[in-house]
Amino acid sequence: MNGSKYRSSLSVDEKVLMSMVRVSELFKKTSSEIFKNYGLTFTQYNVLRVLNASEDGTNTITKVSNILLVTGANMTGVAKRMERDGFLLRKRYTQDERVTLLEITPKGRKALENIQPEKEKHIDQFVGDLSAQDKAGLLATLKQIYSRNENN
């Protein structure tokens, strides 16, 4: 296709949104390569991050799925595989048998610890050259866009 030309018909607004998606997908793809070295997918890594930041390393499967924007059905499969691989435990909540609790294991904590240096270097490749002010402004803008649209 020598000489073929492509001219985008997207509006500036659409180009902005598509650029956000492209950066997000590139970050996810390249991050996944790091996590794969530790036996984790992108989603599984983020489950560990949520649990590690939760009180006592424990949270409900529903809260974790809401934080990560993962459907309940997908989260159940992710949790089962992570339990099988020793990264977390699934337990029933004693006050309500319908609620499943997820708890990070020492193996899960160790994986996060081992991943940290590589992950930080990787993040630096994406945003390390931005000023603190640019990062804060970009974060505020993204949060504003998200909050305006999260219930649509």
Image (cartoon, rainbow, N blue to C red):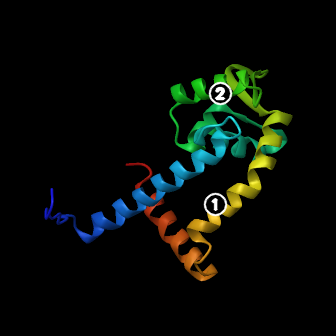
Q: Amino acid at mark 2?
A: Ala
* Residue 128 in view (yes/no): yes
- Residue 79: numbered disc: 2
- The percent position of residue 14, horizontal first and vertical second, equals 28, 63
Judge the density around disc 2: few (<14), some (14-19), many (≥20) Cα neighbours within 10 Å: some
Who is closer to the viewer here, 101 or 1? 1
Q: Is residue 96 left or right of residue 137?
A: right
| Disc 2 to disc 1, C-alpha distance | 26 Å
Label at residue 122:
1
Query: Looking at numbered disc 1 in the image, what kind of residue is underneath it?
Result: His
Element type where label 1 sits in the image: helix
Q: Which of labels 2 and 1 is toward the front?
A: 1
> Residue 138's spot in the image, x, y percent?
51, 72
Residue 16: where, in percent of width, then height? 35, 67
Specify whether residue 148 is in view.
Answer: no
Towards the viewer: 3 or 51: 3
Picture mark count: 2
Residue at x 54%, y 77% (from the top left corner): 137
Q: Nearer the viewer, residue 11 or 110?
A: 110
Q: Is residue 75 left or right of residue 113?
A: left
Q: Residue at x 71, y 41 (%)?
A: 48
Q: Is 148 located above or below residue 34 in the figure?
A: below
Point out the residue furthest to the top here: 97
Which residue is pictured at 53% across the width and 55% down the height?
Answer: 27
Q: Quadrant location of the N terminus? A: bottom left
